[in-house]
Amino acid sequence: MGQRIGLFGGTFDPPHSGHLAAALAARDALELDRILLVVANEPWQKLDKRNLTAAHHRLAMTELLVKNIDGIEASDMEIARGGLSYTIDTVLQLQDVGHEVVLVLGADAAGGLNSWERAEELSRLVRVAVVDRPGHRLPKLDNWSIDKISAASLDVSSSQVRSLMSEGTSTAGSIPSAVKGYIDFHQLEWPGH
């Protein structure tokens, strides 16, 4: 029997408290059965912009972020599929087994929706839950079914966390201690972020 699944995809390099706050807000506001934090294998829009942490590390950190949180899971769907990660393929994979899919993303990412692979087809297949992000306004998105989600969003981003880590500055409040411990243990670095 199909479920109402929140699909929250991303690079998660690294995953942070803002990702978790957004997932919790969407899960609760839309009464979703579960939210999948789908870790991109090769995020096509970021490949040429910077070096990415290996997908297995990004998945492991995301699993630590959501450990013991009801209704929120890390997913390796795109890693298992291999190659470039396109949200449309993940949506179709979930719908093929009977799930209803709600795309979850922050207001900062919503502005780029129309540039996504097969965006027009994607807009017909899903509702989009856009979660508030400090300093970002919900863009005008014609042809998309949008639910605006208010959240006690933290003003944190993966790029900020990478910057703090490369400077040796405290990440307290930005990432859970389990994620920080994983980064330290595996000596993950983002030089010259």
Image: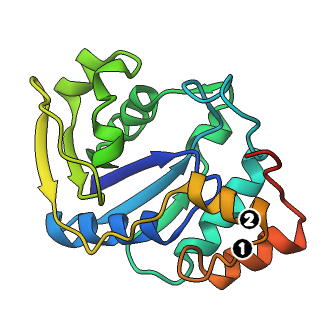
Amino acid type at mark 2: Met
Residue at disc 1, secondary structure: loop
Pointer 2: residues within 10 angstroms few (<14), some, or many (20+)? many
Residue visible at 67% across and 40% down in the picture: 80
Residue visible at 37% across and 61% down in the picture: 35
- Give yes or no for contact between labels 1 and 2 (Cβ–Cβ under 8 Å): yes
Q: Is residue 164 visible?
A: yes
Residue visible at 57% across and 78% down in the picture: 67
Rendered image: mark on residue 165: 2
**Spot occupied by residue 29 in the image (x, y as percentages of width and height):** 16, 68
**Spot occupied by residue 129 in the image (x, y as percentages of width and height):** 21, 50
Residue at which label 1 appears: 169
**Spot occupied by residue 169 in the image (x, y as percentages of width and height):** 72, 73
Pointer 1: residues within 10 angstroms few (<14), some, or many (20+)? few
Q: Front-most of 93 and 42? A: 42
Q: Is residue 1 visible?
A: no
**Quarter of the image holding residue 175?**
bottom right
Residue 96, above or below 150: above
Residue at disc 2, secondary structure: helix
Question: Which quadrant is the N terminus positioned in?
Answer: bottom left
Horizontally, residue 116 falls left or right of residue 179, namely left
Residue visible at 64% across and 76% down in the picture: 171
